[in-house]
Amino acid sequence: GGASVQTVFSAFACDAGAANQPPVFVTSPHSRSTAVETEIRCWAGGACRIPLHARDFAMDASGVASGDVSDDVVRIEPLVLGAALGKGAAGALRHLQGGECEGRGGVSCLFT
């Protein structure tokens, strides 16, 4: 049978500095665990819903993540290469509570 594959990956722009690190994907909205699923299978003809959760942890004075959530803006944006090349979008990304996929310290969104 045929197959359709879509790759979702992350890239972060960070401010320069000694006490900074990028946000990380986590397993649920309030989780600290980065053991996220790296492969999700959806069946042809069925709905495919992929929850994405990212959090930004503050750094302490020594440059180690403190475990506290930062107050920085975290945003997940879709980049669908086919759409960028004029071949149509393959999915949508929305905040779990509606609107853009953006929040302070963390964000939870649904890719469909």
Image (cartoon, rainbow, N blue to C red):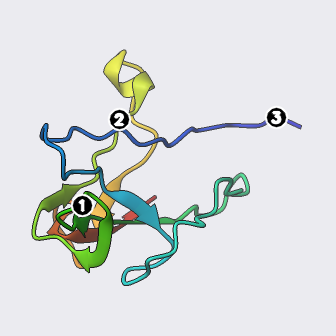
Total number of numbered labels?
Answer: 3
Question: Which residue shows up at 71% across the image and 56% down it?
Answer: 41
Q: Quadrant of the N terminus?
A: top right
The mark lying in front, picked from 1 and 3, is 1
For badge 1, the amino acid type reads: Ser
Disc 3: which residue: 2
Picture quadrant of residue 42: bottom right
**Horizontal side, residue 94 vs residue 39: left or right:** left
For badge 2, the amino acid type reads: Leu
Question: Where residue 79 is drawn, which disc sits there?
Answer: 2
Instruction: Tell which of 40 and 13 is nearer to you.
Output: 13
Disc 1: which residue: 62
For badge 3, the amino acid type reads: Gly
Residue 80 point in image, percent of width and height: 40, 32
- First in sequence: mark 1 vs mark 3: 3
* Residue 97 can be seen in this image: yes
